[in-house]
Structures are given as structure tokens and as C-alpha cells.
């Protein structure tokens, strides 16, 4: 059965779902309605689309396998979407509309930590369970929320291992890690600030020197000022975090300005498709990932990580390398299925307790929630882009191609 996917742009909303319109209920006939405000326009649109496709693919697979069984009856999953326009205030407004006007009682998360920070208080206020896949900021899990659960690893882990590898390089050459000179360029959003915090912790641990510490511009369209300083000061490692748009801007301008740094690490490489759009400049980039398709994990619904990867690419053949954002979005939908069946109920609090008790292996990795709602059972991974555009898992410095030395 094809999933019903509803996407309502802000402009069309007043025409299609006005106050007098009969609201959707949480369960319509044999269909369970999940809701999500997701970024389909604005600066997070690329990853918003990756997330939406992950949600839709999971619902399709679950529905084709018989759906969700509650009270001896099978139910299909459908997802009602609104476009939050990458704006936190709009996201919070639409989350309340989903709950109050549309009767949605089960929420899937938005894209990004900032959007999740805006929406989580809304779902919490109404006691609506939300399973999210794209808000990694550790600060989300220090607020005492009871209805927020995340399948991904928290953000301070994203680029911290790149610092460890820079330290390993110095030790291998019988030098002190404190000699490493670091350049940092981060967006000012909650996610990137948490990534930076994890990096700074490790820099301080080794006594490394930060010689550039820049914040990327809000629109993420130009980091030439930072790269001009990089060319002049010649750091040993350049570390960047600015979601998909920041990664695309960085790769483009590294190429245009012919920047060579021995080690470059950045988030969102795959989501920005830097290996396709800027194959020369992207060679040697270190890219953190929440998930790899070669992971030796599996489940009864999606099979192995490779099975999920092949199935997703069959539905969305435009991907040469599937971004982890799509995989973790599918995992979030799978959590709902398992929790509905464990609760054997549509009651929100019973479902919330069932989600909190989830402990399972999936194609995406292990999932077990702490009392604060973050997944404590899955690690982060690091991969390096090769000259052919492929991604290779890097677990230690010896696995790397070093130094990165691109001919422009």
C-alpha cells in the first residue's frame, strides 16, 4: 500500500486546513497518523528532504509487511507533513497546529537541533510522544523532557575523533600533539556549537593550539574570509560544521581558493554530496557519520544495513551515497512501530512508556534510550572520501590517507 504523504506549504495551509475544517484524528480507520513539521524550503531543505524520504521509505516498508498490529488489528502508517521553512518559530507554530487542529498524537522530529529545540516544548506541553532522528544537540537532553526520544548519537561526538587522529599523527612521528595547530569554522546554531564543544574538549586535552576560531555567516554562503586566513596561517587541521549548505560552501570555496590543509574534517559531506559536486577538493575530507551501510547490524523489518541501503536507493535512485539522515529517519519510524505493538494501545502515555523501554537491534544500529531520551547504545563513525568519490571507514589514524594533498 502506498503511504499517504501530505505536504502542506505555508501558503496553501489556510486554503486547505482552516479552523472549520474537520480535523484528522490520531487514528483514522485502519491508519495511524504520524505528524512532522519538516524543512522542505529554506537553508535546511536538503536535509529536510533526506529526512522525509527516510520517514516515507520506512512507512512504505512497514505497510507492505503488514503494518502495525494493535489490539489484534493491523494498521497502516501515514505521515502528515508541514513545511517549517527552516524557521524555528514557524516549526513550533506548525507542531501546535498538527496537535491541536489536526489531532495528531504521535510526532516525528524535524531536521536540525535548532528546529527540534523549538518543537520539543510544544510536544512536551501536550504530552505527545516525539521520536526524532535529526536533533543531536546534547542540550536537548538536559531539559527534563519526558516525551522526547532520539535515535541518533549526540553532537559532541561528531568531530571529536578527528582531533584524536591529528594527535595520533604527531605521536607516530615522535612529536607532541600539543604542536598541532587547529583552524575552526562553525555555524552558530545549537548543533554546531555542541560539535565545537566536543572538539574543544579534545583540543584542550592534548594542549593543541587554536589559531583560527571563526563563526560562519548566518546564511552559510561565504567562508572566504576564513579560508584566506587558512591559506596564510597554514594550520595542520581544518574543522568545519555548518550543515549541508555549510559543507557545500566549504567544498566549493576550498576548490576555488585552492586550499591545501593536511587534514580537513567537516560534517554533512554526504548530505551535501561534496564527493559528486567537488570531487577534487573533497578528496581526503574526513566526514563523521551516524551510520554506515557496511554496519553488521540487522532487524526483522529492514534486514541488514546493506539491505536497507539497497532498498532505499531502489526507491530513490538519484543517490550514489545515501546520507545517514535518511537511515536514521527510517529508524525513528521503526521505533514507533515497535512501541505501538509493545504498548498494544494508542494511549499516548502508554506509548510513551513503551518507547522509553525500547531496546533493540536495527539496521541502523542498537537503540536504547537513557532516562533523558537520547540513544546510549550507538557510536559515531568517521569516513574519508577517496579520489574516486568513495567513502572509507576510518577507525584510527593508520586507516587514513594522510596528508591530504590535492592538485588544483
Image: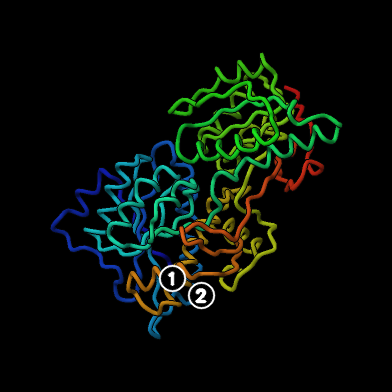
Q: Quadrant of residue 257?
A: top right
| Residue beneath disc 1 | 1
User: Label 1 crowding class (10 Å Cα cut-off): few <14, some 14-19, many 20+?
Assistant: some
- Compute the Cα span from label 1 to label 2: 10 Å
Asked if marks 1 and 2 touch (Cβ < 8 Å), the reply is: no
Give the left or right position of residue 88, taking residue 356 as reference. left
| Residue beneath disc 2 | 65
Front one among 397 and 81: 397
Quarter placement of the C terminus: top right
Q: Residue furthest top?
A: 232
Residue 333's spot in the image, x, y percent?
46, 63
Q: Residue at x 21, y 54 (%)?
A: 17
Task: Count how many numbered circles sit on residues in the image.
Answer: 2
Residue 135's spot in the image, x, y percent?
46, 49
Q: Residue at x 29, y 72 (%)?
A: 28
Q: Residue furthest left?
A: 20
Q: Residue furthest bottom?
A: 72
Which element carries disc 2, helix, strand or loop? Answer: loop
Q: Residue at x 74, y 48 (%)?
A: 395
Residue 386's spot in the image, x, y percent?
74, 39
Q: Earlier in the sequence, mark 1 or mark 2?
A: 1
Nearer to us of marks 1 and 2 is 2
Q: Quadrant of residue 114?
A: top left
Q: Residue at x 46, y 65 (%)?
A: 59
Residue 21's spot in the image, x, y percent?
16, 59
Q: Say if 77 sits above or below 158 in the image.
A: below
Quarter placement of the N terminus: bottom left
Front one among 358 and 275: 358
Which element carries disc 1, helix, strand or loop? Answer: loop
Front one among 161 and 81: 161
Q: Say if 336 sits above or below 227 in the image.
A: below
Amino acid at each position: 500500500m502506498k503511504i499517504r504523504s501530505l505536504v502542506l506549504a505555508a501558503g496553501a495551509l489556510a486554503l486547505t486546513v482552516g479552523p472549520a475544517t474537520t480535523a484528522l484524528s490520531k487514528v483514522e480507520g485502519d491508519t495511524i497518523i504520524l505528524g512532522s513539521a519538516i524543512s522542505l524550503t529554506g537553508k535546511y531543505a536538503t536535509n529536510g528532504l533526506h529526512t522525509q524520504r527516510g520517514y516515507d521509505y520506512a512507512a512504505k516498508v512497514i505497510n507492505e509487511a503488514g503494518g502495525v498490529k494493535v489490539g489484534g488489528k493491523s494498521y497502516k502508517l501515514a505521515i502528515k507533513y508541514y513545511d517549517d521553512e527552516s524557521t524555528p518559530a514557524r516549526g513550533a507554530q506548525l507542531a501546535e497546529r498538527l496537535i491541536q487542529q489536526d489531532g495528531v498524537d504521535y510526532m516525528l522530529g524535524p531536521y536540525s537541533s535548532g528546529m527540534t529545540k523549538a518543537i520539543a516544548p510544544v510536544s512536551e506541553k501536550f504530552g505527545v510522544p516525539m521520536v526524532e532522528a535529526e536533533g543531536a544537540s546534547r542540550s536537548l537532553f538536559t531539559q527534563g523532557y519526558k516525551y522526547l526520544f532520539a535515535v541518533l548519537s549526540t553532537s559532541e561526538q561528531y568531530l571529536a575523533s578527528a582531533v584524536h587522529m591529528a594527535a595520533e599523527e604527531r605521536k607516530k612521528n615522535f612529536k607532541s600533539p600539543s604542536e598541532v595547530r587547529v583552524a575552526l569554522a562553525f555555524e552558530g546554531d545549537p548543533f554546531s556549537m555542541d560539535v565545537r564543544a566536543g572538539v574543544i574538549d579534545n583540543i584542550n586535552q592534548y594542549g593543541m593550539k587554536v589559531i583560527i576560531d571563526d563563526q560562519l555567516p548566518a546564511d552559510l554562503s561565504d567562508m572566504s574570509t576564513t579560508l584566506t586566513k587558512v591559506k596564510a596561517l597554514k594550520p595542520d587541521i581544518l574543522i568545519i560544521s555548518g550543515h549541508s549548505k555549510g559543507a557545500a560552501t566549504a567544498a566549493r570555496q576550498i576548490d576555488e581558493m585552492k586550499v591545501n590543509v593536511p587534514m580537513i574534517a567537516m560534517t554533512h559531506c554526504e548530505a551535501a554530496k561534496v564527493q559528486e559536486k567537488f570531487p577534487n577538493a573533497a578528496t581526503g575530507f574526513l566526514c563523521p557519520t551516524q551510520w554506515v551501510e557496511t554496519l553488521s547490524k540487522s532487524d526483522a523489518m529492514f534486514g541488514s544495513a546493506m539491505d536497507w541501503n539497497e532498498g532505499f536507493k531502489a526507491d530513490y535512485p538519484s543517490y550514489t551515497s545515501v546520507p545517514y539522515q535518511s537511515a536514521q529517519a527510517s529508524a525513528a519510524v521503526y521505533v514507533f512501530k515497535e512501541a505501538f505493538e509493545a504498548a498494544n494501545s494508542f494511549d499516548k502515555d502508554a506509548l510513551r512508556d513503551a518507547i522509553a523501554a525500547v531496546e533493540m537491534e536495527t539496521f541502523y544500529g542498537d537503540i536504547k534510550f537513557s532516562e533523558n531520551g537520547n540513544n546510549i547504545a550507538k557510536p559515531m563513525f568517521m569516513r574519508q572520501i577517496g579520489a574516486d568519490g568513495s567513502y572509507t571507514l576510518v577507525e584510527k589514524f593508520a586507516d587514513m590517507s594522510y596528508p591530504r594533498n590535492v592538485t588544483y
